[in-house]
Amino acid sequence: MHKTLVTIALLFSAVCARSQTDDLMAELNKGADNAKKEPVLATFKATRIINSNTVENLAPGVLDFRILHRFGRISDGAENAFGIDNATTRIGLDYGVTKWLMVGLAHNTLHKANDGFLKARLLQQKTDGTPITLSWMSGMVVYGGDAPVLPPGMEYYFSHRLSYTHQLLIARKFSRKLSLQLMPTVVHHNLIDSAKYSNNTFGMGIGGRYKVSNRVAVTAEYYYRVNNSDMPSAGAKTYNSLSLGADIETGGHVFQLFFTNSLGMTEPVFITGTTDTWTKGQLHFGFNISRVFTVVKPKEFKKDASW
């Protein structure tokens, strides 16, 4: 009997030891799996590629004072100081609400327009995990200035001043140097010649960046309009938007310099209202600059009086 009890005890100890070993290995494997599936950060270094939003969001509590500037046509020559005399500006404030949500408001000198948007991150790319980062952007533009000339008998309402954008941002960081983003988009104009065109313009954007050094990257973006490709803007022929530029990182800030055929800086304007074309040398030099402020201190620093 004594031998039987000893044998059972030994077997029970062996089973427990094996179980503990299995649990320990499971925890180690779980830890290894979690270590592999780390979020992929800095797909882009800024919240915009050039004109378009990226999947990047501001940190919670961070306010970004952002200035977007486009000069007139370089091809206008010395008479207009190669475009300097015909500059347009967008001045805005972007704010990080949570880790996944940011919002923005701005005023544009072009069309005396005001715009606002929100951008929400839906998925985050992870190493050995989720292959893409996915965000949703919705925005609205309110055009100012004088009412356009309408056909006889047609009234002009405030709602005619509104345009909307809905956009899915699909990005992947392929390596430390290369990031690409697809941007299926719908732009809705309340006021349109509905006998010829649709109120909804569907477009596909593609953009990306390639780092050539630790501080410099080349950038590009292009939008193809699926429909309404021949829809004019203020009576002028329109073209697809194409922009090429460079990001320069200095002291935690990114300065963006580029050439584009789009004078507008909101999606309804640069996607459906670009009236210049690269093929005729109708280019605009532009830049984006920003200054970031911490409005709400992160929780981990609230107890630090020196912060």
Image: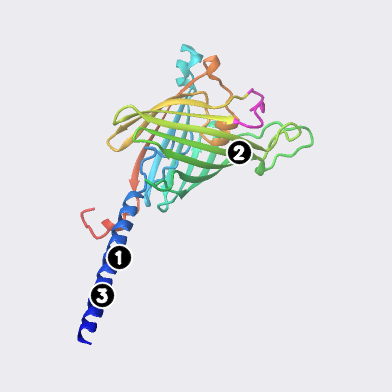
246 inside magenta stretch: no
Q: In which quarter of the image is the N terminus?
A: bottom left
User: Which mark is first along the chain, 2 or 1?
Assistant: 1
The residue lying at 42 percent from left, 26 percent from top is 245
Could you tell me residue 100's position as x and y percent? 43, 51
The amino acid type of the residue labelled 2 equals Val
SS state under label 1: helix
User: Which mark is first along the chain, 1 or 3?
Assistant: 3
Chosen colour scheme: rainbow
**Dot 1 surroundings within 10 Å: few (below 14), some, or many (20 or more)?**
few
SS state under label 3: helix
The amino acid type of the residue labelled 1 equals Asp
Residue at the disc numbered 2: 187
Could you tell me residue 42's position as x and y percent? 36, 41
Q: Quadrant of residue 249?
A: top left
The residue lying at 52 percent from left, 15 percent from top is 281
SS state under label 2: strand
Distance of label 1 from label 2 (alpha carbons)? 54 Å
Q: Is most of the magenta stretch helix, strand or loop? A: loop
The residue lying at 50 percent from left, 41 percent from top is 169
Give the extent of the magenta segment.
Answer: 225-237
Direction right: furthest residue: 153
Residue at the disc numbered 1: 23
Could you tell me residue 174's position as x and y percent? 40, 36
Q: Quadrant of residue 248?
A: top left
Distance of label 3 from label 1 (alpha carbons)? 18 Å
**Dot 3 surroundings within 10 Å: few (below 14), some, or many (20 or more)?**
few
Residue at the disc numbered 3: 11
Q: Which of marks 3 and 1 is in front?
A: 3
Could you tell me residue 119's position as x and y percent? 48, 46
